[in-house]
Amino acid sequence: MVISYKDLGLVNTREMFAKAMKGGYAVPAFNFNNMEQLQAIITACVETKSPVILQVSKGARQYANQTMLRYMAQGAVAMAREMGSKIPIALHLDHGDSYELCVSCIENGFSSVMIDGSHLPYEENVKLTKKVVDFAHQYDVTVEGELGVLAGIEEHVSSEKSHYTKPEEVEDFVTRTGVDSLAISIGTSHGAYKFKLKPGETVPPLRFDILEECEKRLPGFPIVLHGASSVLPEYVEIINKYGGKIENAAGVPEEQLRRAAKSAVCKINIDSDGRLVMTAMIRKYLAEHPSEFDPRKYLGPAREALKNMYADKCKNVLGSAGKGE
Ligand code: G3H
Ligand code: 13P
Ligand code: ZN
């Protein structure tokens, strides 16, 4: 039996992206694995009136249990509505690595899935992505594909070097697969170590020339940016001050994300920034309160800081604040 996302109060990404394209902003796609992260995301997006994509990786699904996740997403919608908010909320599979995983998510209430065939030879990527699209569209579930490889470790692919998206491939890929959005590789990568900088060096600009070339070939088509955490230095500092060891971490400067959000980039993926905020606040609290052992005491401040970080992204980076109502 297919559990329709529509019955859970969720929406797919089609209308969200059409509005983001017109309005020159990007919809946040924040990853979650547990209740505190989800509460922080929903509260931040309700308070800033931002549309939101709740993003679940294969690892998150294994960690939290798929049935639990579905009820959590349903609970997040109910919480938003109880707060008097009408913001659109999508539930999206991040980096789906097989047809079977995408089908399972669609059958379990997801409104959007990513099939990541970016590591496959081009023709195999086309074939797999089209197969997922053909299934998903029967249920009005939207599909994100990917062309080009991001550096960094993902569950199914560990890549030392990134391969930029080849703009000459995007039109053929989108036409033949029927995807609803396309993730491209323009110099970002996953995790907290995006750029290897020598002392005194600054982060190089993203390849906006590749983005512009893709936009030209796909007018009005939604582009997705992965690996878009900024690796906020204030939180890295707190982690290191309280016993952590995060060295030479560097992320995408927020002004570059602002620029991307104004273009055809309609979805910006942020996971690592949330992980860093949560870790920093928990480390700080426990170091300052060594005899405390009630998880609510250290998860509460972490949740509050997370909410503030997400709200800041919506208001000051992605431009999605106020666009959800
Ligand atoms: O792109 C990867 C996301 O940050 C999810 O990470 O696979 O460790 O849950 P994960
Ligand atoms: P970050 O590691 O930069 O947060 O990227 C997250 C992401 O792309 C999830 O798909
Ligand atoms: Zn990603």
Image (cartoon, rainbow, N blue to C red):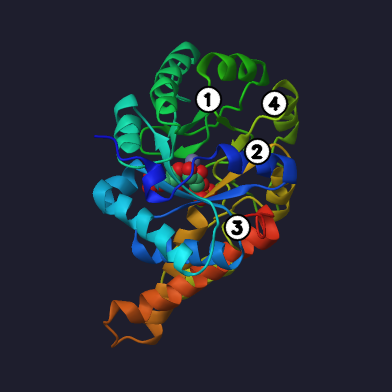
Q: Nearer the viewer, residue 223 or 160?
A: 223
Circle nearer the viewer, 4 or 3: 3
For marks 1 and 4, the one nearer the N-term is 1
Residue for badge 4 = 214
Residue at the (75%, 24%) spot, across then down: 216
Residue for badge 3 = 50
SS category of the residue bearing label 3: loop
Alpha carbon separation for disc pair 3 and 1: 24 Å
Residue for badge 2 = 18
Residue for badge 1 = 179
Mark 3 in CB contact with mark 1 (< 8 angstroms): no
Identity, as a three-letter code, of the amino acid under mark 2: Ala
Q: Label 3: few (<14), some or many (≥20) within 10 Å?
A: many
Residue that extends furthest to the top in the rendered view of this protein: 123
Mark 4 in CB contact with mark 3 (< 8 angstroms): no
Query: In this picture, is 75 found above or below 213?
Result: below
Residue 34 position within the rendered picture, expressed as x and y whole percent measured from the top left: 34, 60
Identity, as a three-letter code, of the amino acid under mark 1: Val
